[in-house]
């Protein structure tokens, strides 16, 4: 009985989201990273932004260029001079002014963020001075013990995300190219959980773990962490970490879709509003270590540099950037697809790494589709969601 009731409520909720998303639709391609820049939208667009601008916005800030591991999958380019503390604080001051939405999440990445000496000061400034709603740390956890975990919590980190590549030590260590990294990650995860930090095991599905996702998911849950999933974003045309078998890839997306707990529900709600599976620039923006601003961490589409221009101006000018417009637009071949209003072309970064173009649909897609797809079955169809 309860199951049917929940199903009924979910269906009504999704109808409301679809309707809200319909109003929102006109605005999305003119992209809404900052609700402040809505003057270029038509009346309906402006109204819908005002009504619906409660979704989270994330800033992915890369704070350093050093790491204790050498992961084969890593997108980070260890180059350029990292921003100084003052520059980061000035940027954070601006973030709060540019994004008027209160629901901001600061993602701290690198390199390995904990190797930056002033890491705690950066978190404290974000959380206590700027009053950023949520601070999420991406860490390999190798440097974390019980004492450090408590300090991380006290500085203001709300969420920790730790990559877990396999439940088998040798496989995990072969990806990080560091013996002992698996045991260190497990120890770190346990300390983070003990300190009371919400901790996720980040499962990036690659050729080395795609056949054991269920075991890996259970392993992460047994550690006391929650699993979240993400596809490996290909880094070069010949890349043996990519799941190049279309059936297996789709099975992984479907598995991720059905096993990401609350995450899937939140993503679905967002997807219905933003009309795209990909959050880049609509909900999220990336700042690389040297201050370069891009829509997503995986692409080298430069929108500006916060050392040279204000963040406000970078976001404003982005509305006229033709490469960004290609990156955000719906590919021609997707237009007849029954999933287009939810998927919007999938992940463009993936495709760009291989073919160097932003205009075509996701490389992993088997569509366009004709069937009307129920929300609970989306994972079987769309090539990407986040
Ligand atoms: C660049 S790392 C930096 C933070 C930290 N050192 C860590 O490993 O979590 C940020 C996250 O992106 C993930 N990542 C790196 N390269 C990726 C790729 N090509 N595709 C998907 N995820 C990737 C990493 O596993 C990690 O969880
Ligand atoms: S630990 Fe993180 S930053 Fe370091 S190499 Fe691995 S993915 Fe890249
Ligand atoms: S499912 Fe495939 S064809 Fe349909 S919108 Fe997404 S990428 Fe395009």
Image (tube, grey):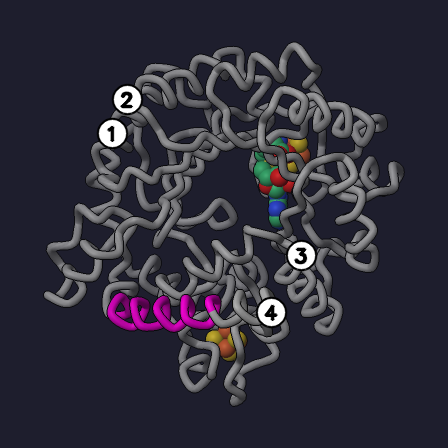
Which dot marks residue 1?
Answer: 4
Q: Secondary structure at mark 3?
A: helix
Callout 3 touching callout 2 (CB < 8 Å): no
Where residue 117 appears, as percent x and y from the top left, is 53, 11
Which dot marks residue 255?
Answer: none
Q: Which residue is mark 3?
A: 259
Marks 2 and 1, Cα distance to the nearest angstrom? 6 Å
Magenta stretch, main secondary structure, is: helix
Where residue 282 appears, as percent x and y from the top left, is 35, 54
Marks 3 and 1, Cα distance to the nearest angstrom? 37 Å
Q: Nearer the viewer, residue 200 or 211?
A: 200
Q: For marks 4 and 2, give the one nearer the viewer.
A: 4
Mark 4 / mark 3, whichever is N-terminal:
4
Q: Nearer the viewer, residue 133 or 46?
A: 133
Which dot marks residue 94?
Answer: 1
Q: Quadrant of ligand 2?
A: top right
Instruction: Note whether residue 301 is visible.
Output: yes
Placement of 115 over or under 9, stated as above or below: above
Callout 4 touching callout 1 (CB < 8 Å): no
Q: Which residue is mark 2?
A: 90
Marks 4 and 2, Cα distance to the nearest angstrom? 54 Å
Q: Secondary structure at mark 1?
A: helix
Mark 4 / mark 1, whichever is N-terminal:
4
Q: For marks 3 and 2, give the one nearer the viewer.
A: 3
């Amino acid at each position: 009985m309860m199951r049917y009731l929940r199903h009924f409520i979910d269906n009504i909720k999704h109808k409301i989201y679809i309707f809200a998303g319909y109003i929102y639709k006109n605005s999305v391609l003119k992209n809404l990273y900052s609700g402040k820049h809505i003057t270029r939208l038509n009346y309906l667009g402006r109204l819908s932004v005002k009504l619906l601008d409660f979704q989270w916005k994330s800033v992915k800030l890369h704070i350093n260029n050093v790491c204790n591991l050498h992961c084969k999958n890593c997108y980070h380019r260890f180059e350029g001079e990292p921003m100084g503390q003052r520059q980061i604080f000035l940027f954070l001051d601006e973030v709060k002014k540019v994004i008027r939405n209160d629901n901001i999440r600061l993602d701290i990445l690198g390199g390995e963020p904990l190797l930056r000496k002033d890491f705690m000061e950066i978190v404290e400034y974000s959380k206590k001075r700027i009053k950023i709603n949520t601070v999420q740390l991406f860490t390999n956890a190798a440097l974390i013990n019980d004492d450090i975990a408590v300090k991380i919590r006290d500085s203001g980190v709300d969420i920790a995300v730790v990559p877990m590549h396999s439940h088998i030590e040798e496989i995990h260590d072969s990806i990080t190219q560091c013996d002992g990294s698996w045991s260190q990650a497990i120890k770190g995860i346990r300390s983070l959980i003990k300190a009371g930090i919400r901790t996720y095991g980040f499962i990036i599905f690659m050729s080395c773990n795609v056949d054991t996702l269920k075991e890996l998911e259970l392993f992460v849950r047994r550690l006391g962490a929650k699993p979240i999933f993400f596809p490996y974003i290909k880094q070069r045309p010949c890349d043996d970490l990519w799941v190049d078998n279309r059936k297996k890839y789709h099975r992984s997306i479907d598995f991720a879709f059905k096993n990401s707990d609350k995450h899937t529900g939140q993503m679905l709600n967002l997807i219905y509003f933003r009309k795209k599976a990909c959050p880049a620039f609509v909900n999220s923006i990336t700042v690389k270590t040297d201050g370069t601003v891009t829509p997503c961490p995986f692409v080298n589409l430069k929108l500006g540099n916060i050392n040279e221009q204000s963040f406000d101006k970078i976001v404003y000018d982005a509305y006229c950037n033709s490469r960004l417009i290609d990156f955000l637009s719906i590919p021609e071949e997707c237009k007849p697809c029954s999933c287009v209003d939810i998927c919007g072309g999938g992940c463009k970064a993936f495709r760009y790494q291989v073919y160097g173009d932003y205009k075509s649909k996701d490389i992993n897609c088997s569509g366009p589709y004709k069937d009307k797809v129920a929300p609970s079955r989306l994972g079987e169809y769309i090539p990407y969601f986040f």
